[in-house]
Amino acid sequence: MAGAEQYLKPSVIRSVARLDLRARFIVEGFLTGLHSSPFHGFSVEFSEHRRYSQGDDPRNIDWLVFAKTDRFYVKKYQAETNISGYLLMDLSESMSYTYRQELTKFDYCICLAAALGYLMIHQQDPVGLMTFSQQLHACLPARSKRSQLGNMLGLLSKARPAGQTDVAGNLRRIAAMIRQRSLFMLFSDLLCEPEPVIDALRMLRHRGHDVIVFHVLDEAEVTFPFDTLSDFEDPETGERMIVDAAGIRGDYLESLRELRSRYKRDCLRMGADYVALDTSLPFDRALIEYLSQRKARF
């Protein structure tokens, strides 16, 4: 994919609009819950009306609207300091892998990030981008301008996954940089030791940030379709190993299941969201499945 426009081609935008993801995000609490403010009624600006329902504060009824419509509407407020979102993109060499899918893990994550960035900006939420491998690379501050999405995708379209990664170390660096409560959306294959990453995620939650972990693997990494003597290479270290794929398949799949289960369990305990995906799942369906999981919990 040569340019940023590939990640927001008309078919992608139509898909997002057709699924009405923006409304689902609002209704199911993905963004609405993040807009709640302990200072509700102070330092807020009027945004829209909605029909009065039982339990609403009668003091919020807009009597001018009532005079015009003979119906009760309340003023709906939105905090001026909306939560900022940050897309955190892993640029390690392993993210460039694909076995038989059209998209690499990196391309797949960019499509997800494009959809989420599109939704947040149209919800008038600031969103920024940070990319990393062993060190932080691009750091684009959160903005809510329409041009922000093009800026983010422009950076991502020029990025090239390379080298090893330090997910935990970079999460800690980001926590030190961003003090204001934010929503961090991590996109990574998490091919690293889980314990430091879980500790870093726990630190982000302890500091009041919201966290979503999109754990994206290639379809072949999830299904392990190999059944002969196979030559595997670690894309980040270059280490090679010839193995009997059929002989280790069961152990491999069990280890992967345990890894995903651990991330899911520990993220649930700390109040973070964990979304396990693979590149065979259309990214719009991936978002719908994630939203369905949230709906089941609320």
Image (tube, helix red, strand yellow):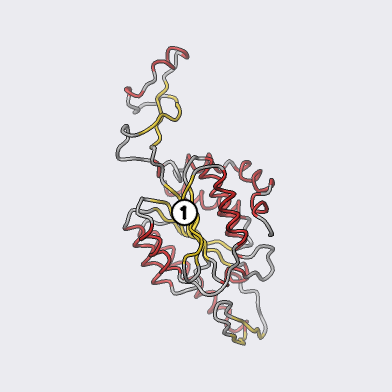
User: For residue 230, which quarter of the picture?
Assistant: bottom right
Q: Is residue 35 above or below residue 153?
A: above
Disc 1: CA contacts within 10 A as few (<14), some (14-19) or many (>=20): many
Residue, x 54% and y 81% (percent of image)? 237
Helix, strand or loop for disc 1: strand
Quarter of the rendering occupied by the N terminus: bottom right
> Does 276 sit above or below residue 134?
above
Q: Which residue is mark 1?
A: 86
Residue at position x 34%, y 40% in the image: 37
Q: Position of residue 265 (x, y in %)?
A: 40, 63
Q: How many marks?
A: 1
- Depth check: give the residue in front, 128 or 272: 128
Q: Residue at x 36, y 50 (%)?
A: 181
Answer left or right for 42 relative to 162.
left
Along the line of sight, which residue is nearer the eye, 99 or 156? 156
The quarter holding residue 58 reads top left
Residue 211's place in the image compared with 95, above or below, is above
Residue 257 in picture, x, y percent from top left:
50, 70
Along the line of sight, the residue nearer the viewer: 88 or 202: 88
Establish if 284 lies above or below 106: above
Q: Nearer the viewer, residue 80 or 202?
A: 80
Quadrant position of residue 108:
bottom right
Q: Position of residue 277 (x, y in %)?
A: 55, 61
Residue 298: give x, y in percent of width and height: 42, 46
Of the residues shown, which amino acid type is indicated by label 1?
Tyr
